[in-house]
Structures are given as structure tokens and as C-alpha cells.
Image (tube, rainbow, N blue to C red):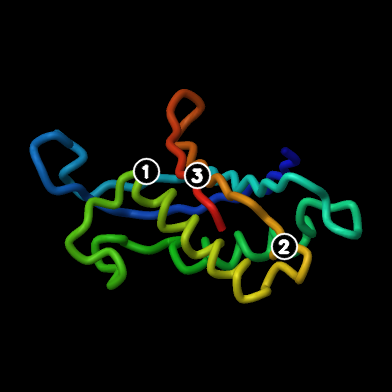
Amino acid sequence: MYSLNVRDHFMIAHSFDGDTFGPAQALHGATYVVDATFRRVELDADGLVVDIGRASSALQTVLAGLNYKNLDEHPAFAGRNTTTEFLARAIHERLARAIRVGELGEGALGLESLVVTLHESHVAWGSYEGPV
């Protein structure tokens, strides 16, 4: 399996509902480093997993909709705890949609899977992996 990874970051504010979250129930900020790893069994006709420029642009576009936002007020996340794991899937879904509608080029339609990893710090991160 071949893979190509692109990286970016975004900053948000949010709070969590439930005693499980202790002090994180209060509004707080987070800066996530995001890795998007695109995977396929065979390279496309150009010898690529996916065009790195298009992959980077697509990730940047997805993150722009979240960057500097209070996720407690984001309509798409109403009533949800925007945990690292939850956000990894939300970003995965938005990138997968961009792939399916051709925003990463025709060659990207052959991608098998996508892994989105959100790094909360140098010692903690969460991921979501699924088909495109």
C-alpha cells in the first residue's frame, strides 16, 4: 500500500459536556497539528498516490472552516462533544467528500483510504481511518 501525507494545523475553542471531562468542561483552546494520509494499492498513471499540492489545498480549505472558531457555536457540531476523535472523523468526512467530487483531481478517485490524525501535543493524538 502506498501512502502520501500532508500536514497543516488549526486553532479552536470548545468545551465539553459531562463529568468525564473534568476541567475541560470549561471553555478552553486547542491547537491541533493535522496529518492527512492518503492510501492506495497502486500508483495512478502519473506515478502518484495523489497530487500533493491538491491534497495540501484541500486540507487547508477544510481546516479554514474550523480555524479560530468556537466549536460550541458551530452549527454542524450542535450538541456534540468535539473531542479529538470526533474532529478527526469530521475532517475525514470533509476530505473524502472533496475527493469524491473531484477536487483532488481524477487520479485521486483511485484512493482506497484516508487516515486523519489530530495531534493535541507531542505525547497525545487521535485518528480516524476509513474508505474514501
Q: Earlier in the sequence, mark 3 or mark 1?
A: 1
What's the amino acid at mark 2? Ala
Q: Is residue 60 left or right of residue 24?
A: right
Marks 2 and 3 in Cβ contact (< 8 Å): no
At a point 51% along the width and 41% down the height, the residue shown is 117
44 vs 120: above or below: below
**Depicted 17 relative to depicted 67: above or below:** above
As drawn, the label of residue 108 is: 2
Identify which amino acid the numbered label 3 is placed on: Glu
Rendered residue at 72%/42% (across/down): 3
Between the C-alphas of marks 3 and 1, the distance is 13 Å
Q: CA distance from mark 2 to mark 1?
A: 26 Å
Q: Position of residue 49 (x, y in %)?
A: 77, 51
Dot 3: what SS?
Answer: strand
Secondary structure found at label 1: helix
Give residue 129's mark.
Answer: 3
Residue 72 coordinates in the image, percent (x, y): 24, 61
Viewport quadrant of the C terminus? bottom right
Q: Residue furthest right?
A: 46
What is the secondary structure assignment of the residue under circle 2? helix
Location of residue 60 (image quadrant): bottom right
x, y percent for residue 8? 61, 50
Q: Which residue is mark 1?
A: 84
Disc 3 crowd, CA 10 A, few/some/many (<14, 14-19, 20+): some
